[in-house]
Amino acid sequence: MKTLLLIRHAKSSWNDPEMDDFDRPLNKRGKENAPEMANRLLSRGTVPELIISSPAKRARSTARIMAKEWKYPKEAILLEEELYLCYASTFLKVITKIDDDFSAVAIFAHNPGITDFANYLTEEIRIDNVPTAGIFAIEAETDHWEEFDRAKKRFLFFDYPKSEVF
């Protein structure tokens, strides 16, 4: 079995409208939500063995904050250029390259791609929008990430900071 956690970056700052989108940092709420959501995963007993992130500052920062809560070394976070503002299909390209030694993987990315990909993965629920710091989790019945797309999948959960389900 393989578990995939799709995590949208936490809330970013728009204080400087001239700033390049790639370089936008997290705002105060984003810095509060990221560790909260990491701890929600801990309470579920779900911790990724591998973290892959878009290199954009807001995604990278979210990954680092959550990694700290999970006692995951920030130096081990893989930055994947293709994840910056990517289409849903790009996620599959990234996933097929994951080493099979990892059973649980977190991918930090952006909308609209992350919402589109979450909806592609399951018909159990439809998501209009993965909010900032939102986490979509799915399990695939396979031992090989290369087979992830074709594998039977089971929706695990969808959680986000303002969720009342948790």
Image (tube, helix red, strand yellow):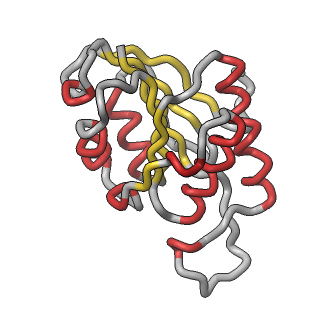
Q: Is residue 164 left or right of residue 138?
A: right
The quarter holding residue 148 reads: top left
Q: Is residue 122 left or right of residue 63?
A: left
At 70% from the left and 45% from the top, the residue drawn is 34
At 38% from the left and 55% from the top, the residue drawn is 80
At 40% from the left and 60% from the top, the residue drawn is 85
Q: Position of residue 143 (x, y in %)?
A: 27, 16
Q: Position of residue 158 (x, y in %)?
A: 56, 27
Task: In the rendered view, tell whether residue 119 sits above or below residue 138.
Answer: below
At 71% from the left and 27% from the top, the residue drawn is 40
Q: Quadrant of the N terminus?
A: top left
Task: In the rendered view, tell whether residue 157 sits above or below residue 87.
Answer: above
Task: In the rendered view, tell whether residue 94 sits above or below residue 11.
Answer: above
**Residue closest to the eye, 127 or 59:** 59
Q: Position of residue 96 (x, y in %)?
A: 24, 36
Figure label count: 0
Task: In the rendered view, tell whether residue 21 sits above or below residue 123.
Answer: below
Name the outermost residue toward the bottom.
Answer: 18
Q: Quadrant of the C terminus?
A: top right
Q: Position of residue 121 (x, y in %)?
A: 33, 29
**Residue closest to the eye, 56 or 121:** 56
